Amino acid sequence: MAAERSWRTPLVVGLVVLLVTALTVIQVRSQAQVAASLAGQDNTSLAFLIDDLHRSNDQLAAEQLTLAGQRDALIAGGSDAADAALQAEAQRLRVVEGLAAVTGPGVTISIDAPLNEVDLQDAVNNLRLGGAEAITVAGRRVVMGSVIMQTEGGISIDGAAVHGGPWVLEAIGDPQQLAATADEMTRTLRADPRVRSSSYQASSTLSLTAVLTPRPFVYAISQ
Amino acid sequence: MRLRSPRLARLGWYPVMAATALAFGFFFATQLRSQLIPPSAQVARNQALIATVQSLESQNTTYRDRIAADRADISSLEAAAASRSASSRQLALEVADLRAHAGLTRLHGPGEVVTVGNGKPNPAAVADTSYLVGFEDIQDVINLLYQGGAEGVAVNGRRISPASRLAGEGEAVVIDQGPPLEAPFSIAAIGNRGEMETLLADGSSLGDLKSRQRDFQLQLAWQGSGDISLPAYDSSLDVTYANGG
């Protein structure tokens, strides 16, 4: 009995020490990982990141709600509901891909300056960030994937020569967000020595009639 | 002369030992804490912000997973319902094609993978961040790949759609409603490999990136592949204000 106790005590002590050591190591490692990630980000960047993530998550939540509604309507309805859903989806995707003419609230930005292809690509990206759902540059409809490039004769969009005298960008989307974006863009542009003038006008109804031509896949296979 | 008896002397060692162990314990604990947690209230705030970012990123992933699942469900339901009539079948085929071009389906095919990574800072100009890859660099590469005929593009596994937009947050690149992405970036494009490679190798293309590659050892490389897979777009394609005619 005494012999049994004599080996059991160090065993218990050993296990306790092992457990405490393991817990300490886990705690120290997790704190060290947090400490390492702290080194890369300052509080201001994190605050902006949080703001962006909140906005993104709200948009994703709204999209998910819409999709859940579509799915439920399809489950509840028959083939008529499916046809209606397919028609609506086709129209929405044509707008997204720039294949349909659109109307809606928006802004028209006018820039009198010798802009290059990067300026125009940046302007288009800025408008998208500012809530644009459809955009034209110099009367040409553009989406992500449109090729804006410098040529010997100037700028071309999807192979067609375009001219800015001044450059006119039109965007349909969230009117308040777009107006704020257009305001900031034109103010920033005025500080550019190349820019002779830049202004914008908000409209409650803007029509973008230019559309893109569908490009069938040659190399890609959809799964 | 002895001040204490041997027994008392031996007993006297216990408090001394205990006090020494206690002192060492406090010393080690203080040392460990000071190494792990920099002595500033800023850090506590920073940790709280990081925890918030992590929680929001987790929510972000959940939403995007649900969106992908809902889109798959809708597609199946539509296909099943559309099989009942020829006109519905035609409509379903049209939508499937539109979805593929909007980036809503997975794609595979031959293509290029461009890798862009941060370079090395200039010790003489610490504030100069030209050695870092920004969202404009990624935008330039994407535009060049489209110029080379890319039919589908993804950045670090995030598919680009016709409505995609890029933004920068510190050293991170944010694409659409996704989580922040950090260098190195892998930009995969399906399309004509020869055309994309010719443009990438052209001295006049990606001028800014290539000059920073020379000056700051920024990483810029590309590799062709016979078969690349791109995931489906999993963010919002909301159309609220633009009414199709």
Image: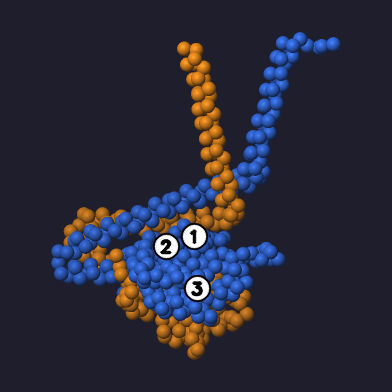
Identity, as a three-letter code, of the amino acid under mark 1: Leu
Q: Most extreme residue toward the left, as rendered?
A: B85
Determine the chain carrying the residue at label 3.
B
**Discs 3 and 2 lie in a common subunit:** yes
Instruction: Classify A117 as above or below B71.
Output: below
Report whether residue A131 is seen: no
Determine the chain carrying the residue at label 2.
B
- Residue B10 disc label: none
Q: Nearer the viewer, residue B119 or A110?
A: B119
Label 2 environment density (alpha carbons within 10 Å; few <14, some 14–19, many ≥20): many
Tell me the residue that label 3 is attached to: B140
Give the mark nearest the N terminus, 3 or 2: 3
**Residue shown at 56%/51% (left/top)?**
A37
Give the x, y percent position of residue B43.
Answer: 62, 46
Label 1 environment density (alpha carbons within 10 Å; few <14, some 14–19, many ≥20): some
- Residue B158 disc label: 2
Q: Nearer the viewer, residue B155 or A170?
A: B155
Tell me the residue that label 1 is attached to: B181
Determine the chain carrying the residue at label 1.
B
Q: Most extreme residue toward the front, as rendered?
A: A3
Mark 1 touches mark 2? (CB < 8 Å)? yes
Give the mark nearest the N terminus, 1 or 2: 2
**Residue shown at 65%/43% (left/top)?**
B35
Q: Which chain is blue?
A: B
